[in-house]
Amino acid sequence: MPADSSTALSPEKTSTPLTSTARATAPTPGAKVRARWLLALALAVAAFNLRPAVAALGPQLEQVRTSLHMNAGVAGLLTALPSLCFALVGLLAPRLARRLGPAVTVCLGMGAITLGIAARSFAPDSAAFLLLSAFALAGIAVSNVLMPVLVKRYFPDRIGPVTGLYSMSLALGTSVAAGVAVPLTTALGGGWRVGLGVWSAAGALALLLWLVQATMLGRDGAGTPGGHTPRIRITRSPTAWLLGVFFGLQATAAYATMGWLPQIFQDAGISATQSGLLLAVTMAVGAPLSFVIPSLAARLPHQGPVAAVLAACGLASYAGLAFAPAAAPWAWALLLGVANCAFPLVLTMIGLRSRTSEGVAKLSAFVQGVGYLISVPGPVLIGVLYQREHGWSGPLALLAALMAVQLVLGLRAGRPRQIEDEV
């Protein structure tokens, strides 16, 4: 990051002459650079905490169900809860950010994540577990929406690299939580309560960093009663709808991968252990690519070709899984991991499709709200098709069709457009 005066955390500049007192207290360029790096670190640590509440639960869900006497209906609701919370609660994020400022709002989100994860490990019954999980997911939902907003506001000259940084951290948080949840629980010897509650420690670290950011930035970015901001009717933007449906289709593919890929390999005769490793490879390949792809996409005037390449990798993987899953399983896993990097790509496009941080806030909330709602029925429908056909031809054909639509939408959403010009 450059060390000149443009690296100030405040995105606004003023031509008003500084008084002698102001000059004496104004931060030096070096202090501004350090503050900017601290904010980038806070974004990365926050992003790491946006998926362990979900990823660490999956491998231990059966233990939770048995311990809390959770019926199948509640367990099904629990698996659908992340998408529902991300969609519905995320829509409130722009309003909170206007009132409190994005940094303060993310700080509250980190607090909700930390408290929710810690408290649900003491839940006495399934109703309390569900409620506390929803509380943690609400904090995640708000933070999900505001990550691109903070990047746009404080790193307008580094949208690609900083989006890549927090996308990579999010991918790491997902893969680490999924991969070490069971071994960590075994090592700690405390059962699922300790195995789930321990992730609140990472949330507490993020909360401390964001308390510092909330103190430094305060209500910066909050709306003022006397201020005039052009109203953006986001639902009138074709680009917003393109990005929303694109987000929903890539989320559907990602959730289907996490939920069903091991079963696809096992039905092809691959062992459960190797199937788990193949899923880990699919998830792990996203970490480095989540850093590279946003930086590349932000340099291009048109992000459509990147979306097309990622979708082509997904189509190739689905074809391999459908016709020869055991012939080259590592290749199919790698290709699917590349295809799932449409997530950091769409986050980058959100930051590029508006001129202001408020516009990005509305666009981010709309895209993620629409997208996560679209993604809710996907994995369930895949399971229904699999149960009806006792095979994977139908489910993989459906996923391939959705991926083809995602490719077309990505080409259109990647065009250089600003939502302010459309509405």
Image: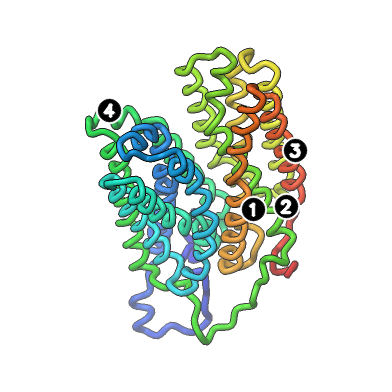
Name the residue: 47% across, 59% down: 142
Rendered image: mark on residue 404: 3
Q: On the image, which quarter does residue 181 sit in? A: top left
Q: Secondary structure at mark 3?
A: helix
The residues bearing labels 4 and 3 have C-alpha atoms spaced at a distance of 42 Å
In the rendered image, the quadrant that contains the C terminus is: bottom right
> In the image, residue 151 lies at what x, y percent?
52, 58
Mark 1 neighbour class, 10 Å CA radius: few under 14, some 14 to 19, many 20 or more: many
Give the distance between the C-alpha atoms of the residues marked 1 and 4, in whole angstroms. 41 Å
In this view of the protein, which residue sits in the foreground, 250 or 34? Answer: 250
Q: Position of residue 276 (x, y in %)?
A: 47, 23
**Residue under pointer 4:** 186
Crowding near the residue tagged with mark 4, few <14, some 14–19, many ≥20 C-alpha atoms within 10 Å: some
206 and 303: which one is in front? 206
Q: Secondary structure at mark 2?
A: helix
In the picture of the structure, the residue carrying the numbered disc 2 is 413
Mark 1 = which residue? 349
Question: Which residue lies at the image location 63% right of the left edge and 42% below the top edge?
Answer: 250
Residue 347 appears anywhere in the view? no
Dot 4 or dot 2: first in sequence order is 4
Asked if 362 appears above or below 23 in the picture, the reply is: above
Does residue 410 appear to the left or right of 250 in the view shown?
Answer: right
Decide: few, some or many residues near mark 2? Use Cα within 10 Å; few <14, some 14-19, many ≥20: many
Please name which of the two marks, 4 or 2, marks the residue nearer to the observer: 4
Q: Secondary structure at mark 1?
A: helix
Q: Kindly state the secondary structure of the residue where label 4 is placed.
A: helix
**Dot 2 or dot 1, earlier in sequence:** 1
Identity of the amino acid at label 3?
Answer: Ala
Front-lying residue, 60 or 216? 60
Residue 204 vs 152, above or below: the answer is above
The answer for how far apart the CA atoms under marks 2 and 1 are is 8 Å
Q: Earlier in the sequence, mark 1 or mark 4?
A: 4
